Amino acid sequence: MNWAAVTFDWNQARAFLATVEEGSLSAAARVLKQTQPTLSRQVAALEQDLGVTLFERVGRSLVPTASGLELLDHVRGMGEAATRVSLSASGQSQAIEGRVTITASDGLSAFQLPPILKRLRAEAPGITVEVVVSNEIRDLRLREADIAIRHVQPDHPDLIAKRLRDSIGHLYAMPAYLDRAGRPATLADLSDHDVIGHGDNARMAEFLADFGVTLTDRNFTLSADNGLVVLELVKQGLGISALSREMAATVPALEPVLPDQLAIPIPVWLVTHRELHTSRRIRIVFDLLAAMLGPQTSPITQS
């Protein structure tokens, strides 16, 4: 539809915009200080005037349809223009505020998120961030987090995913350990070494077997399900373990083991839910994470 050719009733358009941003008619009515029936009639009148369905009901929430999302950009532009006029007249500045929850692995949360959050504080100080540190896949559909940084592609159609880049992992050890235990010359030599596991030793052994590495239970002298603990165990010279290049770079003394023979691809996915289309604060954080965590080589896609 050519929205530019449509004449909008601002009250109807404002009712639509508030319903999108608040997620329900009752919440939108409270924000606009109207009764819910009045606001509902305004939205229904806009749908009738345009001849399209703007919302679908998902549980207790109203979710914009494809037509609704297409209209949203135009109505939001009207709203921002009206806000700018109001703020200009009152001498105030527009603030973007609210909480955004990000879930990411322990290593990424500790070593890569802090400089990003420092920049976010400078650019959007009204946004508060909660970091949920987890190596497990959190369920964004249940709102356990607003944005997830994952190493596997999500498989639910309601989630929005962007593949940022592929990091690389290698096996690393401290020189002191390798001086004592010997430096492996081949992948087969790894079977004679102490390996620090990442919690599920059988899964790690199975994964490395695909690269030609044969490990048994006796190789896993230590194990931890926390990446920072694994890193510290490696730093103490207790064995060899798999680490991302970014994590290993925090300890310059670490020595890669057979890097030319064993490189582990680690995809980096940025994932959020459909609220990305309607929440400015989530959009701002999502875009900043995408810009600072990887090259812009992939479009945002429905996963």
Image (cartoon, rainbow, N blue to C red):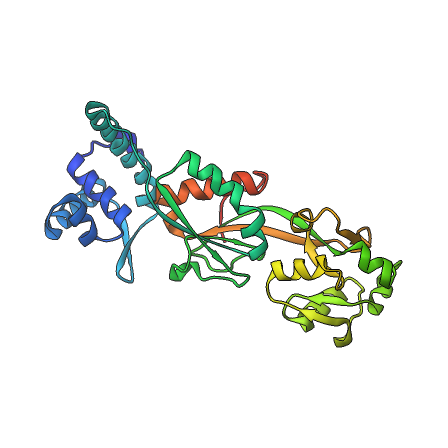
Residue 161, position in %: x, y? 50, 50
Q: Quadrant of residue 45?
A: top left
Q: Where 23 falls versus 134 (above or below)?
A: above
Residue 290, position in %: x, y? 52, 42
Residue 279, position in %: x, y? 35, 45
From the viewer's side, name the closer residue of 1 and 229: 229
Q: Residue at x 71, y 59 (%)?
A: 234
User: Is 51 positioned to the left or the right of 287 in the image?
Assistant: left
Q: Residue at x 20, y 48 (%)?
A: 28
Residue 41, position in %: x, y? 13, 48
Q: Quadrant of the N terminus?
A: top left
Q: Where 107 falls versus 195 (above or below)?
A: above
How many marks the image carries: the answer is 0
From the viewer's side, name the closer residue of 84 and 179: 179
From the viewer's side, name the closer residue of 11 and 244: 244
Q: Is residue 221 visible?
A: yes
User: Is 224 positioned to the left or the right of 130 in the image?
Assistant: right
Q: Residue at x 85, y 63 (%)?
A: 181
Q: Is residue 53 visible?
A: no
Q: Residue at x 41, y 60 (%)?
A: 144
- Which residue, as the protein is rendered here, is positioned at the far bottom? 217
